[in-house]
Image (cartoon, rainbow, N blue to C red):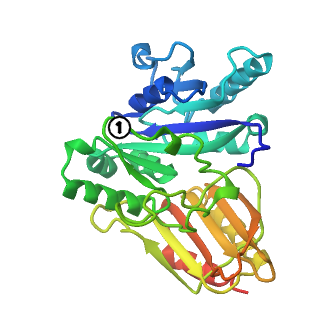
Amino acid sequence: MTSSDTRIPVTVLTGYLGAGKTTLLNRILTGDHGMRYAVIVNEFGEIGIDNDLVVGADEDLFEMNNGCVCCTVRGDLIRVVGGLMRRQKLGERAFDGIIVETTGLADPGPVAQTFLVDEEVRAKTRLDGVTTLVDARHVMARLDDSEQARAQVAFGDLLVVNKTDLVSEAELEAVEARLRGLNPLAPLIRAERAQVPLDQVLGRGGFDLTRMGESGDRLANPPHGHAGHVHDALCEHEHGHGHHEHGHEHGHGTGPRGHDHGDDIAGVSVQSDRPLDGTRLTRWLDALLAEHGADILRAKGIIDVAGEERRLVFQAVHMILEGDLQRPWRDGEPRYSRAVFIGRNLDEAMLRDGFAACVA
């Protein structure tokens, strides 16, 4: 995000029950970072979070315990954010950012969408990142039996594999391979007791188009220990539209498509070394998201548009698409078009053929 953007950054913490979200939240609230955060916590059902678990006397804690913020009470989220911004304007307990901790049973997609599509919310805040925590010891079983757990992994632009001290290296590698199959875009960080460098969670710009691909221009997360393992992959931002991108003759799935586990969510990547027709690409993306947007959880791409010296960068959350022409291609830099789609039961051949049809 450019320094001229004065909107309040929003970080969403998600993950299944027991993954360590509250532990990480407490680390943020007690960390020596000189920042002040407003916290929105929502719990499933009528019982709010145990206030003893959320510490930090100087923080504002908002409990939304009348339902799940991710499904039936998105209006509550808009209302609470509006109230926060009014307090900010009045100078009462000014804060530097907002943290939303979702219930462990929630799909974070609607929360992200709220910050991307609601005009009033977007005018004052910007979605900075979605961090998903997983319990290394139990996540395999949760991914097997919970659609919400799979969606939480798919939506994250950072995956924190927590409680690594409770599993063997072989088990950990199996977990990470499964996670990459569900979400090839997000960097993976290993952690014990949610001990994560806070600068890798806060201020990431994971939804900032201007930062997409700038740390290596990779759209897939390499295995742990390999070069580029922790990086900003492609990134995301808000509501809007772009009409330039580029493609490749071939596409391929990134990571396992659930061969061992039957995962309904997987990542599919497509690429081209030839420039794409910007108009054709825009029409294809519009039609694709209109028809399949409910199943496409996330998408990102960097495109070489025919006749254009700047890279086209796009991202999508469900049916919400935005894109923009970013920096020029550098001298000697390989030009390419690459996109990754993460979703449920994606038709890989359809995505590959549609992308290839956009070649100029």
Query: Where residue 246 sits in the image (x, y, percent)?
Result: 68, 77
Q: Is residue 51 above or below residue 272?
A: above
Q: Work out whether residue 320 can be spotted.
A: no
Q: Work out whether residue 152 can be spotted.
A: yes
- Seen in the image, is 183 located left or right of residue 283? left
The C terminus lies in which quarter of the figure? Answer: bottom right
Which amino acid is tagged 1? Ala
Q: Is residue 273 above or below residue 175?
A: below
Name the residue beneath numbered marker 1. Answer: 19
Which residue does the image show at 64% across and 44% down from the upper left?
113
**Which image quadrant is residue 96 in?**
top right
Query: Where residue 214 sits in the image (x, y, percent)?
Result: 62, 63
Q: Is residue 242 above or below residue 49?
A: below
Q: Is residue 167 above or below residue 293?
A: above
**Which image quadrant is residue 77 in?**
top right
Query: Where residue 167 sits in the image (x, y, percent)?
Result: 20, 47
Which residue does the image show at 34% across and 62% down from the upper left?
225
Tell me the SS state at disc 1.
loop
Classify mark 1: residues with Cα within 10 Å, few (<14), some (14-19) or many (20+): many
Which residue does the image show at 74% across and 21% down from the upper left?
88
**Which image quadrant is residue 36 in?**
top right
Viewer-side residue, 278 vs 35: 35
- Seen in the image, is 125 located left or right of residue 307? left
